[in-house]
Image: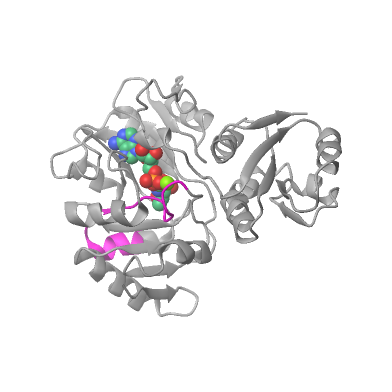
């Protein structure tokens, strides 16, 4: 398949949106930028279009897709019940990086929800994503735009590497600003449950709801059936072997001193500055977790591009946004952590 490429810096925006929306309406696949990561979009009401996404990504069919909408009002077309909590959270955080899980209406095909009786819905804030959904006049289901199991794509080049020739359109919208996928929150029960941590943190949600919520994003074992089916699969893994390093900068530097110069290191600016190794990726200063989050997937994929076999990553504290950062890093490392 020949993939049409658009660059929003140079192509007329009306043409980009019109052409892409028509392709979605015809059952095609369009990769588009969002504030979190790039998504592979299709008509969320068309089971065949959705099945095509699973095929292109190599994604297990029991892992459901998020339905993206452009207006808050559209939720009630697809969700059975809107709790008070859900309404408060939609008002506080939409548009933005929060996905809410509702009981679904029959209009949403079972293929999209992996057979679950719930549907995950999100209203992205990225202007291209919003205009595309508005112009298509249909909800768009979209998983992250990467081959299943590899790190999500936050820049055009990585989308292109994975998906050129496999989708109808790719829209280059520059680097995603958040860099980690949305928070997934189940609001079908009286106590909402975080299924995947993201930029909308537990404490931000609790402040709006004025009550404690649950976080089930970490209790994933082979014995339990996770509520977000996607969380049981190996994720975010680059080709190289990843090890997280937990300890003081002094101890990490001492340990890395014993390694040869072929290793790759992904760490804070402060740590990278003190390292003699050739392949370092500074994520940002330690006090800027948003920048660190934004650069994580870019860093993992950059190590792959350089064919680095051993990748060491600084472990960060898991407070607030650190929770989502460490969730992705632990998965990328297959939970391999070295205490120093
Ligand atoms: O930021 C994001 O959410 C990005 C952009 C493109 O919007 N999308 C994304 O999609 O990360 P994906 O498919 O890579 O991850 C969706 C996650 C999976 O862990 C999936 O299991 C969970 O959401 N999920 C989807 N529908 C669900 C449902 N009905 N119940 C529970 N979890 C659900
Ligand atoms: Mg994904």
Name the residue: 35% across, 34% down: 229
Give residue 106's quadrant in the image.
Answer: top left
Name the residue: 34% across, 25% down: 225
Name the residue: 46% across, 73% down: 8
Q: Is residue 220 above or below residue 108?
A: above
User: Would residue 93 be counted in the magenta stretch?
Assistant: no
Q: Position of residue 83 (x, y in %)?
A: 28, 29
Residues 4 and 242: in front is 242
Q: Is residue 32 above or below residue 296?
A: below
Residues 193 and 256: in front is 256
Quarter of the picture holding the N terminus: bottom left
Q: Position of residue 91 (x, y in %)?
A: 38, 40
Name the residue: 41% across, 74% down: 5
Q: Position of residue 94 (x, y in %)?
A: 39, 45
Give residue 232's quadrant in the image.
Answer: top left
Q: Is residue 304 above or below residue 164?
A: above
Query: Which region shows up in magenta?
Result: 130-149
Asked if residue 279 lies left or right of residue 334, the reply is right
User: Would residue 147 be counted in the magenta stretch?
Assistant: yes
Asked if residue 42 lies left or right of residue 273, the reply is left
């Amino acid at each position: 398949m020949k993939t049409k490429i658009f660059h929003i810096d140079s192509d007329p925006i009306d043409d980009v949106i019109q052409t892409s929306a028509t392709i979605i309406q015809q059952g095609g696949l369009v990769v588009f930028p969002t504030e979190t990561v790039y998504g592979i979009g299709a008509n969320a009401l068309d089971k065949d279009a959705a099945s095509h996404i699973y095929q292109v990504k190599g994604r297990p069919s029991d892992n459901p897709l998020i339905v993206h909408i452009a207006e808050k009002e559209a939720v009630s077309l697809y969700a059975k019940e809107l709790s008070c909590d859900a309404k408060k959270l939609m008002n506080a955080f939409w548009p933005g990086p929060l996905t809410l899980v509702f009981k679904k209406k029959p209009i949403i095909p079972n293929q999209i929800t992996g057979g679950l009786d719930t549907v995950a819905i999100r209203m992205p804030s990225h202007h291209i994503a919003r205009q595309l959904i508005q112009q298509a006049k249909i909800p768009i289901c979209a998983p992250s735009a990467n081959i299943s199991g590899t790190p999500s794509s936050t820049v055009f080049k990585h989308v292109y590497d994975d998906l050129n020739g496999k989708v109808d359109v790719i829209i280059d919208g520059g680097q995603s600003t958040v860099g980690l996928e949305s928070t997934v929150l189940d609001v079908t029960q009286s106590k909402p449950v975080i299924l995947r941590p993201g930029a909308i943190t537990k404490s931000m949600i609790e402040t709006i709801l004025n009550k404690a919520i649950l976080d089930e994003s970490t209790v994933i074992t082979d014995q339990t059936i996770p509520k977000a089916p996607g969380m049981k699969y190996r994720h975010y893994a680059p080709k190289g072997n990843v090890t997280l390093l937990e300890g003081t900068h002094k101890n990490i530097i001492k340990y890395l001193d014993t390694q040869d110069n072929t290793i790759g290191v992904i760490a804070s600016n402060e740590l990278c500055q003190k390292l003699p190794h050739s392949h370092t990726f500074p994520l940002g200063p330690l006090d800027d977790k948003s920048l660190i989050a934004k650069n994580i997937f870019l860093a993992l994929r950059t190590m792959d591009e350089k064919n680095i076999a051993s990748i060491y990553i600084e472990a960060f504290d898991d407070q607030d946004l650190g929770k989502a950062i460490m969730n992705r890093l632990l998965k990328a490392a297959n939970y391999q952590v070295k205490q120093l």
